[in-house]
Image (cartoon, rainbow, N blue to C red):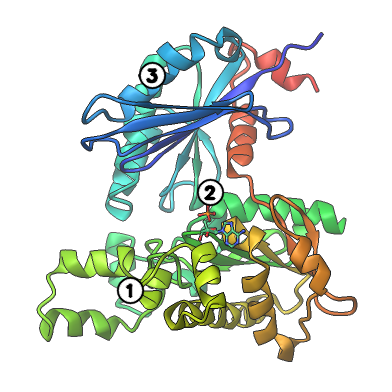
Amino acid sequence: MQKPSHVLVLNCGSSSLKFAIVDPRDGRALLSGIGESLGESTPRISWKCEGRKNQQPLEQRSGHTAVIHFLVEQILSQQPALKTDLTAIGHRVVHGGEKFSHSVLIDQAVINAINECSALAPLHNPAHLLGIEAAAKAFPELPQIAVFDTAFHQSMPRHAYIYALPYSLYRDHGLRRYGMHGTSHRFVTERAAEILNLPLNEINLISAHLGNGASITAVKNGQSVDTSMGLTPLEGLVMGTRSGDVDPGLLMHLGNHLAFPIQQINSLLNKESGLLGISELSNDCRELEEAAEKGHTGALLALEIFCYRLAKYIASYYVPLGDVDALVFTGGIGENSSVIRQKVIDYLGGLGYRLAVERNLQARFGEEGPISADHSPMTLVIPTNEEWVIARDAAALVPPDTPNHDALTRE
Ligand code: AMP
């Protein structure tokens, strides 16, 4: 019988580390978990394996290395088959700058390049490097692969990614729009092509990834040609706690007239704005929907602004695309909230969009498929699976002399 080979997928944030052991052939996660509040006073780890959930505190101020140590010594030691079946480690890396348009096998040059991009993602790239170092120590025999959030958007044309600022800022400092969530937009693009039975290099989509972070991408002939996030994940749509687009003059006003220090402006725009800031209640869409039903004016306004701004972005992407084969909703909100989808589509009536009400209500909890009314522009819900993309890319880049490589290449 064929021996399965799996990929350990790591997603290191500044104070968290998500891990999963994924079968690259079908995206099934055999184990998944997260270390949270890392470097803080009460870090903890929780994980799910074979349907059982577990949680345990970690030692005070434990960091990324401690999570990987716990994974190897405590979790995988109880499940030795999971460890022996590993063939690669795939890392989610937020920023690859202009250096990476595809996933790559990690070597010292790649580590240096990720480090050089740290200025563009100061919270994330240093954490990824910690994860890469810790994983290399724990699994010295396994190849490590970097999968970049920015890579899918490297196909954007210059007129979509250059800011209307002095060109020298781009030339000398790399200040331009890069876009994020590329792994998710790529996943739904590939899946939409399968669902609609269209060749990947011919499909035109508008892909709306709506989670706590949110971004929207125009996909032409299977490639990203515009996206709403920019130099950082702050630009674009209204998000859980991020403002999205604001007048840059507002930042000067906050500094000059209200005496906000730059750190406070940073925190205000990233952590206190968006759905949370408007509603003065919550960044959680589910909670806001419940409050809105009871007439909470802040929640009603937050949801309305979220949908209005999103609908304007969708309409604007007809400029780069011309013809659109489908609008796709994904991410926690896009996959589950029939309320948000209905509101957004209501704003797009002028472009002919209408939903099939029942299909829209049913599309949640992992359901995939069309939700548009007959004879209106195709609208799909596609649950994203970034871990699967990372596992697939990692499996594809495993060098032939790696343990378990043969099992991967035999279908
Ligand atoms: P993500 O960051 O992709 O995990 O998405 C998180 C967001 O999805 C939060 O705002 C959740 O409230 C939202 N969400 C998850 N399930 C639902 C649901 N059934 N209805 C509305 N929003 C949901």
> SS at mark 3?
helix
Could you say which disc has been placed on residue 70 in the image?
A: 3
Q: Hey, which quadrant is residue 392 in on the image?
A: top right
Query: What amino acid is found at the position of numbered circle 3 in the picture?
Result: Phe
The residue shown at (74%, 21%) is 409
Kindly identify which residue carries mark 1: 167
Name the spot of residue 318 as percent of width and height, x first.
67, 80
Query: What amino acid is found at the position of numbered circle 1 in the picture?
Result: Tyr
Quarter of the figure with the C terminus: top right
The label nearer to you, 2 versus 1, is 2
How would you rate the neighbour count of disc 1 (Cα within 10 Å): few for under 14, some for 14-19, many for 20 or more?
some
Can you say whether 220 is above or below 16 in the image?
below
How would you rate the neighbour count of disc 2 (Cα within 10 Å): few for under 14, some for 14-19, many for 20 or more?
some
Can you say whether 337 is above or below 2 in the image?
below
**Residue 53 visible, this orientation:** yes
Could you say which disc has been placed on residue 284 in the image?
A: none
Name the spot of residue 36 as percent of width and height, x first.
36, 37
